[in-house]
Each structure stands twice: as structure tokens, then as C-alpha cells.
């Protein structure tokens, strides 16, 4: 029996129309365009402003485009994974809502929550499902409405985040492309530095939590920056070592887009040329689980069949890791669809 490989056969994405610029933020908090660009490299971010719309709306838009671009029959989809930190509801899952809107009658769906590593982790699950032979086609969507948990009176965090969604179709193939390896870790020590205090079972919603603004993201930037740079660069180097690769063998690195300075420091520490790093944070900010697939969406036309691609990310937990893919198609032929 031929080995079953799990390949990415298409990318779809969606970002809201509303653009929140640094200039507009400077009228909301004590900041400037120069201050933001110097520290995090973000010029603008997209915000979903329409009332009553949440993460599932963006995920559905991305998935619909993905199905249209790939020509995949909705009835042929076996599973849908949505990874998000900002679900529409505590339950049901955001994935179940997206599945219902798309009419995926033969699929099952679930959410995966691994913060900014969510897409990379969910992609590995999808690939494993396909490689097992139990699934032939799996959609993986990374989507977050970060504006729903950002405190727009806190200049340290409100400049960082945006909203968006993107995803990929993972299919079975006998060609030697697709997922080659992954190296994931969780250290479990990151709670004090990056979390959302209230709304969970430890600190349920109450008048006190609302009055004290505990339903917004909290981040202690310095330890997060330090750990992100160390862990992401170490993980990239570990994946290269395990697969007998050098940086010269890599065509693209697609990192989590948290902060341009983090990306630059990771590239320097891992001895990677920035020319090989897919960066679009200037236009979208940190969209959490959506950053890596949005970068694939933006850079799809530059990806060539056989390209060696490294994904790497870091998020709350702390969770981190890297994975190695061989790209399975010429992106230029389909990116314009």
C-alpha cells in the first residue's frame, strides 16, 4: 500500500473592510504612528465592526473562498477544524456554526484552542487524520476577532491586535509533498504573563469582573518577547536538525505575526535571511490563530511546488513549536482565483 501523504491544496482568507490606522489609534490613546512602527512594525489592522458578527462569520467567509478556489465539493469534506481564542460562544463550537452555514453535510467539526499556535497545531491534527486514511479532505481555519477582547484604553496592547481569518484544505496524496515533521512543546509556565482574567470557571463573569475590566487580554510584554524569540528560534533550528536541513534548503519561513521585532530577532538567532520570511504584520497586526494562514493567503502566488516551508509560532501557555512542509502546488496558478 502506498504511503498516504497529507498536502495543502488551497488557501482561502478574509479580513474585514474596516481599517484601523495608527493615526486613528493616536486619537484614542497616548501613542503615535512612529512609536507603534518602531516598537512593533504595525501600520494598520482590520476590525470587524458590524454588530452581531463574530469569529464564525470571518471563518465562514475564508472557508467559502477556499472551497471556490479549490473547486472542492462541500459533500466531500470529512472534517472541519476551527482554531480560535475568540469563539462566538462558550458553546456550541464555532466550527459547528461554520459547518452549518457552509452545508458540509458529511463532515464533523470541532474547535481547537492553542492561542497563537492554534493553526499550526490544528494543521498537524488534520494531516495526521488524512495520513491515517480515515479522512480524505479536512478544512483547517484559523480565525480570531481579537478586537472583542482588546482594551482600547491600554496603549500597550490595543496597537497590536486585529481581526481576520484564513484557512487551508488538506487532502490525501501519494506524491511526496505535504507535512514532513513537527516539533511542538508547551511549558505551562506562561499564565501570569499572558491571559484573559475573567469569564472562565476560575473567575466567572460578575458585576465585579465587568466593573474592573477583567474581560480584556492582559500581556506582560517583556517576558513574552524574550520567551517568544528564544522558543521560536530554537524550534526552527530543532526541525532543521531533525530533518538534516540547513537554512539554505529552506524556501520560506512563515512565522506567527505577533511583532515585527520578534520576527526579526527569531530570523537573526536562527540565521535565516529575512528575504525568506513571509511578513505581513504591517497591514493586519496580530490576528492570533489567523496570522500564519493569512500569510499563506498573501504569499500564495510566490509559493512553488516542492518549496520547503517552515511554520513557527508562540502563544499563551506558553505554547510553541515549528513544523516542516513541502509545498504541493504552484501558487501563482491559483492565487488569483
Image: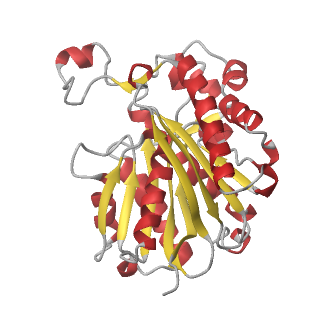
Residue at 63%, 30% (x, y): give it.
229
Residue 288, given in percent of the width and then of the height, sits at 49, 40
Residue 105 visible at all:
yes
Residue 213, given in percent of the width and then of the height, sits at 32, 17
Q: Is residue 143 above or below residue 172?
A: above
Q: Is residue 214 above or below residue 96?
A: above
> Toward the viewer: 15 or 224?
224
Residue 223, given in percent of the width and then of the height, sits at 54, 19
Q: Is residue 27 above or below residue 284?
A: above
Q: Report the number of discs.
A: 0
Residue at 73%, 55% (x, y): give it.
245
| Quadrant of residue 337 within the rendered picture | bottom right
Residue at 64%, 25% (x, y): give it.
23
Residue 33, given in percent of the width and then of the height, sits at 69, 23
Residue 15 visible at all:
no
> Toward the viewer: 151 or 278?
278
| Quadrant of residue 52 within the rendered picture | top left
Residue at 71%, 75% (x, y): give it.
333
Amino acid at each position: 500500500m502506498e504511503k498516504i501523504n497529507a498536502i495543502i491544496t488551497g488557501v482561502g482568507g478574509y479580513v474585514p473592510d474596516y481599517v484601523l490606522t495608527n493615526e486613528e489609534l493616536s486619537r484614542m490613546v497616548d501613542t503615535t504612528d512612529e512609536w507603534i512602527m518602531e516598537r512593533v512594525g504595525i501600520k494598520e489592522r482590520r476590525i470587524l465592526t458590524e454588530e452581531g458578527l463574530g469569529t464564525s462569520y470571518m471563518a465562514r467567509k475564508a472557508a467559502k473562498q477556499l472551497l471556490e478556489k479549490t473547486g472542492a465539493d462541500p459533500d466531500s469534506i470529512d472534517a472541519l477544524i476551527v482554531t480560535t481564542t475568540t469563539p462566538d460562544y462558550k458553546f456550541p463550537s464555532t466550527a459547528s456554526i461554520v459547518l452549518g452555514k457552509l452545508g458540509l453535510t458529511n463532515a464533523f467539526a470541532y474547535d481547537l484552542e492553542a492561542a497563537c499556535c492554534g493553526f499550526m497545531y490544528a494543521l498537524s491534527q488534520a494531516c495526521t487524520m488524512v495520513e491515517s486514511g480515515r479522512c480524505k479532505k479536512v478544512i483547517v481555519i484559523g480565525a480570531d476577532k481579537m478586537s472583542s477582547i482588546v482594551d482600547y484604553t491600554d496603549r500597550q496592547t490595543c496597537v497590536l491586535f486585529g481581526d481576520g481569518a484564513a484557512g487551508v484544505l488538506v487532502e490525501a496524496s501519494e506524491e511526496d509533498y505535504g507535512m514532513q515533521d513537527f516539533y511542538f512543546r508547551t511549558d505551562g509556565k506562561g499564565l501570569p504573563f499572558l491571559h484573559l482574567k475573567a469569564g472562565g470557571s476560575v473567575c466567572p463573569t460578575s458585576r465585579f469582573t465587568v466593573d474592573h475590566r477583567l474581560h480584556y487580554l492582559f500581556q506582560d510584554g517583556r517576558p513574552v518577547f524574550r520567551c517568544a524569540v528564544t522558543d521560536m528560534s530554537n524550534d526552527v533550528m530543532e526541525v532543521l536538525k531533525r530533518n538534516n536541513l540547513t537554512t539554505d534548503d529552506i524556501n520560506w519561513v512563515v512565522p506567527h505575526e505577533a511583532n515585527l521585532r520578534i520576527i526579526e530577532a527569531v530570523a537573526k538567532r536562527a540565521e535565516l535571511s529575512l528575504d525568506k520570511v513571509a511578513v505581513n504584520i504591517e497591514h493586519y497586526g496580530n490576528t492570533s490563530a489567523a496570522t500564519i494562514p493569512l500569510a499563506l493567503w498573501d504569499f500564495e502566488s510566490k509559493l512553488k511546488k516542492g518549496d520547503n516551508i517552515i511554520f513557527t509560532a508562540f502563544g499563551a501557555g506558553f505554547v510553541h513549536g515549528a513544523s516542516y512542509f513541502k509545498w504541493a502546488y504552484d501558487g501563482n496558478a491559483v492565487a488569483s482565483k
